[in-house]
């Protein structure tokens, strides 16, 4: 019986077992990180990497995420905790940035009324109470239109409620602009004949 060969075999076997156990221990450690640190819980909607979905199960080695397309994504806990996770269930409110463009022929009087018109619409939203307008300004003069930027907050983490607010805001904005005789801009391009361009230079 060759003791050297036996010890060598045990050494190689031990290395193989250690390598195999490394991944399992990493997932187990990640499970305890999830358990004690609570980056997410069952039922939370999370986004990690290029994937997003609802957490359905948190296991010792892996977790199950129901992605938006319907299938279940099984991902190891170590891969999950090493990713940058966005937890939308814990979000208290949503910040919305809205850019609205009106054509260049819009009069100065109408331009001055647009910010207050937008603020009044946001203050009258009925889908959910507490929609707050942070600001609404004539931001810039674009390539083909005047641009207004509005920032407001919706006090919910629910995506459907967020979309309902967006829908009501857009419908009321169209209605308000038509009542005021204000048009929405669309991309335009002005082409001058060669004689006109020569005269301008």
Image: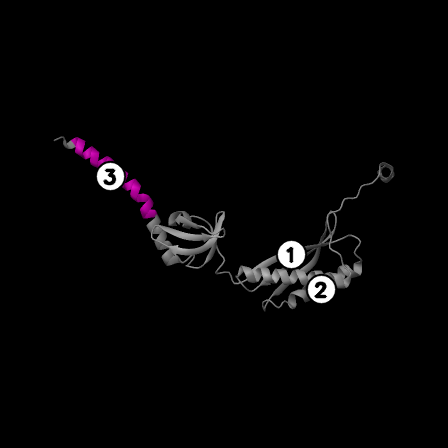
Asked if the residues shown at circle 1 and circle 3 are in contact, with their CB atoms under 8 angstroms apart, the answer is: no
Q: Is residue 161 left or right of residue 16?
A: right
Region of the chain picked out in magenta, as a range: 4-26
Q: Dot 1 lies on which element?
A: strand
C-alpha distance separating marks 1 and 2: 14 Å
Packing grade of label 3 (10 A; few <14, some 14-19, many >=20) is few
List the residue tagged with mark 1. Answer: 98
List the residue tagged with mark 2. Answer: 117
Q: Dot 3 lies on which element?
A: helix
Relative depth, front residue between 171 and 81: 171
Please report the residue visible at 47 percent of the width from the left and 52 percent of the height from the top. Answer: 70
List the residue tagged with mark 3. Answer: 14
C-alpha distance separating marks 2 and 3: 73 Å
Q: Is residue 162 found inside the magenta-colored segment of the image?
A: no
Please identify the quadrant where the C terminus is shown.
top right
Q: Is residue 190 left or right of residue 17?
A: right
Please report the residue visible at 69 percent of the width from the left and 58 percent of the height from the top. Answer: 137
Magenta portion: prevailing SS class:
helix
The spot of residue 111 in percent (x, y) is: 76, 59
C-alpha distance separating marks 1 and 3: 60 Å
Which is more N-terminal, label 2 or label 1? Answer: 1
């Amino acid at each position: 019986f060759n003791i050297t060969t036996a010890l060598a075999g045990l050494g190689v076997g031990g290395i193989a077992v250690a390598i195999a156990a490394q991944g399992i221990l990493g997932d187990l450690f990640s499970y305890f990180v999830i358990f004690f640190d609570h980056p997410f819980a069952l039922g939370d909607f999370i986004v990690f990497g290029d994937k997003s979905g609802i957490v359905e199960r948190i296991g010792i080695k892996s977790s199950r995420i129901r992605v938006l397309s319907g299938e279940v994504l099984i991902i190891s806990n170590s891969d999950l905790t090493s990713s940058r996770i966005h937890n939308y269930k814990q979000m208290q409110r949503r910040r919305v940035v809205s850019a609205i463009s009106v054509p260049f022929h819009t009069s100065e009087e109408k331009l001055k009324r647009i910010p207050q018109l937008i603020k009044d619409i946001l203050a009258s939203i009925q889908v959910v109470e507490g929609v707050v307008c942070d600001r609404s300004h004539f931001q810039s003069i674009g390539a083909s239109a005047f641009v207004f930027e509005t920032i407001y907050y919706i006090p919910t983490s629910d995506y459907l409620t967020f979309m309902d607010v967006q829908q009501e805001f857009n419908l009321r904005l169209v209605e308000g602009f038509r009542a005021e005789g204000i048009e929405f801009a669309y991309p335009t391009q002005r082409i001058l004949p060669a004689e006109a361009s020569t005269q301008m230079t």
